[in-house]
Image (spheres, rainbow, N blue to C red):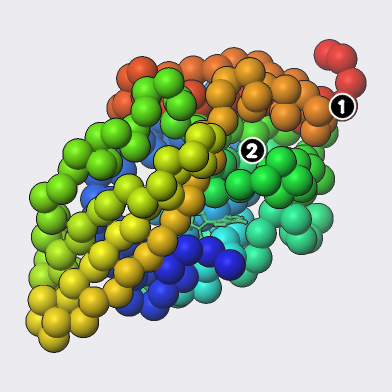
Amino acid sequence: MPDAIFAHPLLARVYDAFDEDRGDLDAYLAIAREWPTDLVLDVGCGTGSLAILLAGHGYRVVGVDPAEASLQVAKLKDRAERVRWIHGDATALPALDADLATMTGNVAQVFLTDDDWARTLRGIRAALRPNGHLVFETRRPERRAWQEWAADVDPVIRDVPGLGAVERRVEVTDVSLPFVSFRYTFRFLADGVVVTSDSTLRFRGRDEVESSLAANGYRVLDVREAPDRPGREFVFVAERSDRSR
Ligand SMILES: C[S@@+](CC[C@H](N)C(=O)[O-])C[C@H]1O[C@@H](n2cnc3c(N)ncnc32)[C@H](O)[C@@H]1O
């Protein structure tokens, strides 16, 4: 069950307003152009920012996410009809033969157990064509991003179309590495409604991610920086491993 921040109908509607700088997505668009790419599978597509960007550049796109409320937000966006939206996760996808699979916005960190992560990698692998690519990011544990979140005590207020001003506070509720838990509290200032969302993320190190990719049928081609967040993220570029070329 996805966290309320993605699955609660009100919180899904405010997600983009609090995540407004999507300069991170340009790097994924550039990566799609590195190889002959037609069909892209965006796993954990959320409110569809990358899927719709890619569709606008002529790619065929499938976006999958278990949070129905986020998909509903995505479907209302311009050009959303160009994307095939699937409510679900990577473990139960139809046959796709995708050229590229992506996970942006640190989706890789929502998989808390080794088993969930392995099943997701295998599900994506089955949806890729032979030698298709998988590209995703994850926060570097050594950068200890949660310390910044804990220091971030000031509320953020955004004006959300149709909902008015919304205030968000974040609090780190537990650090038991590799797991970090935090709570968002949203206050809808027009009517005083308060909704909270609790999340736990897993911070995997580079070696751990690389071995999990190898164990689940991928060859790691590169580990890059996220150009918009230097030093903070690993961007893994992997290839479905089928035969040597
Ligand atoms: C931080 S959001 C990122 C959304 C989107 N990729 C973006 O960049 O805006 C994480 C997303 O992962 C999704 N998610 C949670 N559990 C998942 C799972 N088991 N499989 C796929 N996606 C999942 C959430 O519903 C949410 O949309």
Amino acid tagged 2 = Leu
Q: Residues within 10 Å of mark 1 (few under 14, many from 20)?
A: few
Amino acid tagged 1 = Asp
Q: Is mark 1 within 8 Å of ligand 1?
A: no
Which label's residue is closer to the chain start, 1 or 2? 2
Residue drawn at 41 percent across, 61 percent down:
198
Name the image quarter holding residue 9: bottom left
- Residue denoted by label 1: 242
Q: Are marks 1 and 2 in contact (CB under 8 Å)?
A: no
Q: Position of residue 165 (x, y in %)?
A: 11, 70
Observer-nearest residue: 185 or 165? 185
Left or right side of 22 for 84: right
Give the secondary structure at mark 1: loop
Residue drawn at 60 percent across, 59 percent down:
64
- Looking at this view, name the residue that lies furthest to the right: 243
Count of marks placed on residues: 2
Quadrant containing the C terminus is: top right
Q: Position of residue 102 (x, y in %)?
A: 57, 41
Left or right side of 119 for 225: left
Q: Residues within 10 Å of mark 2 (few under 14, many from 20)?
A: many
Give the secondary structure at mark 2: strand
Quadrant containing the N terminus is: bottom right
Observer-nearest residue: 237 or 84? 237
Q: Is residue 107 visible?
A: no
Observer-nearest residue: 155 or 38? 155
Q: Position of residue 201 (x, y in %)?
A: 49, 45
Residue drawn at 29 percent across, 34 percent down:
147
- Residue denoted by label 2: 100
Residue drawn at 32 percent across, 48 percent down:
172
- Looking at this view, name the residue that lies furthest to the bottom: 191
Left or right side of 222 for 118: right
Relative to 238, residue 5 above or below: below
